[in-house]
């Protein structure tokens, strides 16, 4: 090992030790210890028990969800947290019961899936990630926290920081996409947004990094499926956003449902104990996923619920969400000597720490102000905030001959598509507290710009009664409406087609094997194209789709995801040019499902180069490349990159400088992306990896020179011993507006 590397490792160990000491001296430790000393074993176990409320359900209904038993347990102080209880009145009722009637009156945590908003919905997280705008993402999470805290909640089960390379997996809509660097920055921004700078403030809530770990690597993109990955992928792709979450002081973690290399994540002491709690020194707590402790038996890891409780707690899962494994069995397991009481004490201290930090012991009703509940929900500033976020989330995929933006005087527009007047689907999945049909539809957005448009629905593709608990019914047979749409399109000057997935086609339990436009939409699009080629395709979807035909034929394509409450306004502002789009894809869009998993930061393989014979890394029937790569996104202006220079300084700090010019005629924002290749390493490195990005606004003909500083964090990687190392050798840096092209320069680290 090089001397410098040895020094770095020693420094890391030192930093780790200092950090650990700092944490042990947290200002609540003596209060936590004093409280713990008063608690009976049953009361301690009670803190580790989380029940679902009496109203919403976000998983399979438990057989033992008996309401009166829950009330009994609440009164005894045998419940540490409730999920899916929200609204000041309900929260106050249960908090009062516990605080006034249980022996020690330890307040409850109230957790809820505030994934992209509470009442006002921001874009789905994948869409927000397309903004690459960390301040905007942080602001969006703070809006969500403001509303959530106003209805009694003090804990969100977000952000989901699972990296995923497989668009078949429905939960890609909840995350930051395929890249660990971007994913880490977004994780950090969301946590800061939820938790603010003062967790005890009345408008901030505890965040939860989930799902630990590797849930996004479910085989074949099938939800809850097996995960089998090597340490290189685990350390360098999966773990970085979780590590970033700990660095951002996230208060809680959530287990994942999956097994990872044969061991369920919920019973995985290597993940929970060794990495999270010991190596990263995380001092918050780990909540299981919904019944994931109970599911240890279904996995074939535990014999029964009792054994599951034992395995989960010993592995480091601190709170049991809804499996009732802990409340039923932990006390006895301690008495039998199968679980050490010190393990219980550690879990309880972690849970109490978060309660103290939230300020619940000072005022358990601090989030229960009915006045605030009235004024915060649907506040106009929240709508303004999510509108800004929605505009930033839009990605202009294609714009041949500058068909977009449309002139505000544009005559004779025909808008086609079931989704164009849909006020529900754009709210997206995981919007449990939003009111149905409250999104601004595309038609409503267009009304502010043009009276000269007609709307023709075309075939009804999606069932209006679609909900969070069932699959969306899709019409693939009844073609009524296609001919009317074609007739209308014949005489139009511009056809705007609004197509995509229904908002409830992505999210949990919603994996797909086909990623084309569902139902009759491809047929409708092709039929319209036959009579009018001036098509602007506005897409609404919760994951990457296979848009090969669309990219070959349709001149203008706008990726509008599910943009939340202000969806239609954001889309209209982009289409009519009041907002210049600047989003960049956080996931690759494949040509076909057969390419999946598909990701830009793949390895070289031993046979990367095209050969005249078949023996190289490729498909017989498809290109290797995606239709739209990671980082892709156009603007109504153009940017030019010049003067890339690299300066390697002492102690492996590298400065990369580049000048970017707006060469078009309108002001615009650009995301400058820096990718790195480490050519030879003891663990092979991807052909490129994002290691820096900056988003800037440039007026026409203006330039800006930017410098990126790369150090160990960016130049290094985790080796087989899970140490962050920088190895000497040749690197290439690429800087540009997309993962597929940019200026390049090579340099050496000695
Ligand atoms: C999901 C979690 C969610 C939990 C509580 C589970 O089904 O996997 O992400 O936080 O339910 O609603």
Image (cartoon, grey):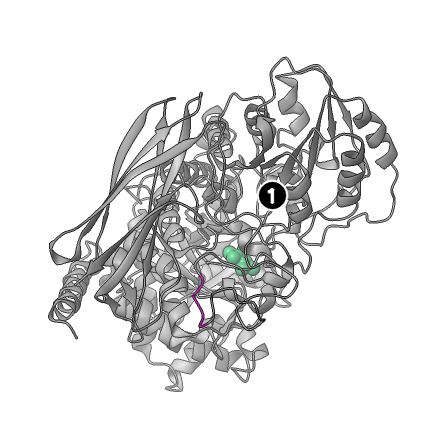
Is the C terminus in the top left, top right, bottom left or bottom right quadrant?
bottom left
Say which residue appears at 31% left-offset and 57% top-offset: 246
Residue 386 locus on image (x, y percent): 49, 32
Quick one: 513 or 709, which is closer to the camera? 709
Q: Quadrant of residue 47?
A: bottom left
Within 10 angstroms of label 1, few (less than 14), some, or many (20 or more) residues? many
Apparent side of residue 728 relative to residue 57 in the rendered image (left or right)? left
Q: Position of residue 387 (x, y in %)?
A: 50, 29
Q: Is residue 674 above or below residue 266?
A: above
Of 136 and 585, nearer the camera is: 585
Q: Position of residue 250 (x, y in %)?
A: 34, 53
- The residue that label 1 is drawn on is 428
Magenta span: chief secondary structure? loop
Horizontal side, residue 250 vs residue 375: left or right: left
For residue 36: magenta?
A: no
Magenta-highlighted residues = 602-606
Q: Residue furthest front?
A: 612
Residue at image point 82% right, 31% down = 485
Q: Residue at x 60, y 17 (%)?
A: 407
Instruction: Give residue 54's position: percent from left, percent from top.
Output: 59, 53
Can see residue 667? yes
- The total of numbered circles placed on residues is 1
| Quarter occupied by the N terminus | bottom left
Whether ligand 1 has any atom under 8 Å from the Cβ at mark 1 is answered as no
Relative to 504, is 525 above or below? above
Q: Is residue 71 visible?
A: no
Which element is circle 1 on?
loop
């Amino acid at each position: 090992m090089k001397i410098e590397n040895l020094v770095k490792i020693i420094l890391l160990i030192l930093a780790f030790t200092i950090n650990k000491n700092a944490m042990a001296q947290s200002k609540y430790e003596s209060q936590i210890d004093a409280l713990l000393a008063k608690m009976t074993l049953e009361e301690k176990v009670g803190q580790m028990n989380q029940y679902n409320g009496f109203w919403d359900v976000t998983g399979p209904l438990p057989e033992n969800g008996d309401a009166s038993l829950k009330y009994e347990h609440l009164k005894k102080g045998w419940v540490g947290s409730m999920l899916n209880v929200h609204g000041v009145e309900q929260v106050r009722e249960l908090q009062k019961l516990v605080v006034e009637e249980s022996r020690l009156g330890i307040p409850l945590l109230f957790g809820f899936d505030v994934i992209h908003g509470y009442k006002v919905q921001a874009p789905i997280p994948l869409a927000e990630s397309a903004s690459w705008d960390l301040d905007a993402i942080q602001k969006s999470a703070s809006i969500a926290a403001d509303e959530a805290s106003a209805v009694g909640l003090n804990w969100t089960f977000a952000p989901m920081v699972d990296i995923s390379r497989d668009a078949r997996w429905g939960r890609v809509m909840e995350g930051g996409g395929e890249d660990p660097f971007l994913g880490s920055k977004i994780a950090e921004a969301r946590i800061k947004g939820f938790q603010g700078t003062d967790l005890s403030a009345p408008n901030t809530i505890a965040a939860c990094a989930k799902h630990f770990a590797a849930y996004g690597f479910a085989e074949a993109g099938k939800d809850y499926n097996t995960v089998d990955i090597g340490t290189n992928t685990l350390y360098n792709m999966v773990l970085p956003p979780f590590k970033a979450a700990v660095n951002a002081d996230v208060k809680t973690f959530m287990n994942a449902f999956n097994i990872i290399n044969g061991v369920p994540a919920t019973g995985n002491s290597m993940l929970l104990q060794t990495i999270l709690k010991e190596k990263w020194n995380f001092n918050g707590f780990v909540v299981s996923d919904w019944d994931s402790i109970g599911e240890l038996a279904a996995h074939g890891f535990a014999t029964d619920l009792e054994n599951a409780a034992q395995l989960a707690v010993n592995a480091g899962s601190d709170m049991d969400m809804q499996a009732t494994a802990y409340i039923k069995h932990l006390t006895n397991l301690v008495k039998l000597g199968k679980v050490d009481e010190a393990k219980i004490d550690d879990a309880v201290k972690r849970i109490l720490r978060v309660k103290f930090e939230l300020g619940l012991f000072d005022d358990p009703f601090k989030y229960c102000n009915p006045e605030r509940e009235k004024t915060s929900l649907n506040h106009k500033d929240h709508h303004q905030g999510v509108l800004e976020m929605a505009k930033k989330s839009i990605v202009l995929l294609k714009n041949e001959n500058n068909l977009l933006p449309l002139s505000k005087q544009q005559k004779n527009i025909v808008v086609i598509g079931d989704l164009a007047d849909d006020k529900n689907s754009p709210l997206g999945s995981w919007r449990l507290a939003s009111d149905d049909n409250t999104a601004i539809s595309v038609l409503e957005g267009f009304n502010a710009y043009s009276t000269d448009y007609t709307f023709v629905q075309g075939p009804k593709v999606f069932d209006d009664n679609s909900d969070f608990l069932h699959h969306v019914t899709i019409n693939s047979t009844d073609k009524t409406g296609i001919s009317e749409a074609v007739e209308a399109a014949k005489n139009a000057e511009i056809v705007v087609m609004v197509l995509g997935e229904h908002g409830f086609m992505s999210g949990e339990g919603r994996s797909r094997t086909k990623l084309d436009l569902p139902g009759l939409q491809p047929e409708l699009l092709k039929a319209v194209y036959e009579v009018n080629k001036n098509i602007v395709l506005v897409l609404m979807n919760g994951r990457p789709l296979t848009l090969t035909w669309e990219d070959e034929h349709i001149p203008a394509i706008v990726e509008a995801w599910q943009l939340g409450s202000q969806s239609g306004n954001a889309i209209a502002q982009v289409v009519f040019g009041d907002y210049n789009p600047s989003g960049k894809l956080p996931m690759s869009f494949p040509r076909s499902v057969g390419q999946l998993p598909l990701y830009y930061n793949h390895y070289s393989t031993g046979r990367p180069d095209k050969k005249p014979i078949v023996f190289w890394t490729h498909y017989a029937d498809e290109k290797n490349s995606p239709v739209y790569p990671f980082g892709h996104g156009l603007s109504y202006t153009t940017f030019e990159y010049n003067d890339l220079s690299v300066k390697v300084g002492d102690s492996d700090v590298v400065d990369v400088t580049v000048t970017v010019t707006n060469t078009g005629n309108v002001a615009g924002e650009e995301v400058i992306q820096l990718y790195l290749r480490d050519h030879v390493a003891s663990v092979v490195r991807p052909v490129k990896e994002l290691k820096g990005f900056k988003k800037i606004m440039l007026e026409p003909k203006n330039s800006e020179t930017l410098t990126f500083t790369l150090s160990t964090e960016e130049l290094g990687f985790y080796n087989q011993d899970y140490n962050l190392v920088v190895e000497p050798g040749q690197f290439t840096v690429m800087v540009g507006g997309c993962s597929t092209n940019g200026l390049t320069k090579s340099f050496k680290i000695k």
